[in-house]
Image (cartoon, helix red, strand yellow):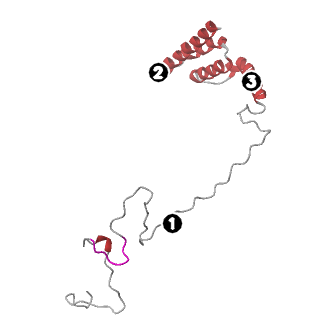
Amino acid sequence: MFGHDNNTPQQDDNATAPMPDATLSDAGDSQPTGAPPTSLPPVGGDDAVTYSPDDTPAATPEPAAVPAPAEPDVATPQVAAPAPGSDDLLGIKQQALQQLSPLLGHLDQTPEEKFRTTMMLIQASDNQSLVSEAYEAAQKITDEKVRAQALLDIVNEINYFTQHSEAA
């Protein structure tokens, strides 16, 4: 190519001949010196040896050092306890629910939003007196699928209150 006769072999004094790949050789049991074995000893048992490509047993890597867990503080309880101040949070929640109930009508909400808010109040406070407000909001929902789900939620909530009161 490019000024050379393609029919005559070209020899570069600096180039070396490529080494044949011994693993692709299909010459039976004869293998070039230094090539990895074409078959490894059977795996398993106490005498199993792992070979690396240079035909020497591979060193087993040392596991990374894992720091020992710190000793638990004797004063720290091992059982999950409620977060400090959870009684305070529950008290604030109850006060907010009590203050929100009479203000619910002042919120600018769609009938679906009003229904969802009222259901949240019912479930958070177990206040069954709000069921009628949720029912009124559900009746005003224009999307039939959403209204059907809202009415089903009302029935489920009523079932909860009637079964809860029968069990008491």
Residue sitting at the far right: 75
Q: Are marks 3 and 2 in contact (CB under 8 Å)?
A: no
The residue to which callout 2 is attached is: 145
Disc 1 target residue: 59
Q: Is residue 14 magenta?
A: no
Give the spatial CA distance, label 3 vs label 2.
32 Å
In depth, the one of 60 and 21 nearer the eye is 60
Whole-percent x and y of residue 53? Answer: 41, 70
Quadrant location, the N terminus: bottom left
Q: Residue furthest top?
A: 166
Question: Is 79 left, or right, of 11 in this rendering?
Answer: right
State the residue position of label 3. Answer: 96
Q: Residue 59: x percent and y percent?
A: 51, 66
Q: Local crowd at mark 2 within 10 Å, few (<14), some, or many (≥20)?
A: few
* Point 74% across, 43% down: residue: 72
Q: Observer-nearest residue: 98 or 144? A: 98
| Residues in magenta, as a range | 29-36
